[in-house]
Image (cartoon, rainbow, N blue to C red):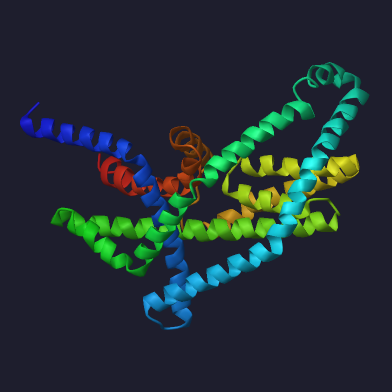
Amino acid sequence: MNPRSLLTNLTIIFLAILSWQLRWVLLVFFGAIVISVALDVLIQKLGRQINLPRSISLAIVLLILLFAGSLIFLLVVPELLTQVKQLGALLPTVIAKIRSIMASQPSLIGLQQSIPEQISWDRIQPVGSKLLGFAGGAANSIIQLILICLLAILMAIDPEAHRRILLQAMPKTYRQPIAELLDDFRLALGGWLTGMTISATTVFIITWAGLSLLKVPLALLSSIVCGIFTFVPTIGPSIATMLPLSVALIISPTLMLEVLIFRLAIQNIEAFILTPILLSRTVNLLPTIALLSQLSLGALLGLPGVLLALPLAVVLQVGIKKIVVIQIMDQW
């Protein structure tokens, strides 16, 4: 191995170790990039309607988001807290209902006899306490979230300046390809954020309307869970469906079957029609890639890794296609 190759390998190892040591800083920075791209999408949409300086457009977008967030908080959060309390009161009833159904089925008697020791309200309460403790620990990360938002706003004020700094740090021969790669990253990430947000919002509204028409209790809470879990491909919608199914089971098995059919219809429309149409011009992640990225970053970085796994997977998918596939494998 010649000295140049040795130096290159040592540099790569050093950068890898440094990146791992600074992984939380890089995670905060990437989170800020994701939010700044989302803000940039809104700024550009506003710029097409009104010709204003970027700083004023950003201020208008932030004011609109603040007003909308405050309105949603005042209208939705009180009802949501009430429904969360109702869910806690309904859990023992759901467990009792499941036991009675198992006891009435001869083929499930053996399973029913083995489950009561594991599934009981007395055993669920400590688990709930642990989850609340975890939520309390996550609430302590509010400073990190504020820092991410602050960095995102600073980057959204003048993204071109940050872009120029990055390009100037590269060798001159690589600046044009890297500039094109950054444009591809921006297009893919912005399109993915827009598409998934529209998809999740649509799922939330339709689920809320459908559950309300079916007169299922806790319709708002169930709809919010279903909308949020739309961002988790493959297993997310199925997990979210368990909440309205369990609540509907308290009323009657017929209502539970109606909710199941309703949710299956929404899941298939969202997965095979709505999301592919919204992401047809950007990046549509394969379910396997999305799930593996969430599992990997969740194991390495915990909850923040799970939250940023999908946008990072979008960026990596574009980078692998442009660099590894086109520049290396296609030329081999």
Q: Is residue 46 visible?
A: yes
- Quadrant that contains the C terminus: top left
Give the residue displayed 38% in from the left and 42% down from the top: 24
Q: Which residue lies furthest to the left in this view?
A: 3
In the depicted structure, whether residue 3 falls above or below residue 197: above
Q: Is residue 167 left or right of residue 156?
A: left
The image quadrant that residue 300 belongs to is: top left
Of the pair 62 and 314, the residue shown nearer to us: 62
Tell me residue 275's x, y (percent).
Answer: 58, 54
In the depicted structure, whether residue 285 falls above or below residue 93: below
Report the label total.
0
Q: Is residue 207 visible?
A: no
Of the pair 326 and 193, the residue shown nearer to us: 193
Tell me residue 109's x, y (percent).
Answer: 87, 18
Give the residue displayed 90% in from the left and 28% down from the top: 100
Q: Residue furthest bottom?
A: 51
Tell me residue 303's x, y (percent).
Answer: 51, 40
Of the pair 56 and 254, the residue shown nearer to us: 56
Q: Is residue 259 left or right of residue 47?
A: right
Tell me residue 55's x, y (percent).
Answer: 38, 75
The image quadrant that residue 134 belongs to is: top right
Of the pair 61 and 192, the residue shown nearer to us: 61
- Quadrant that contains the N terminus: top left
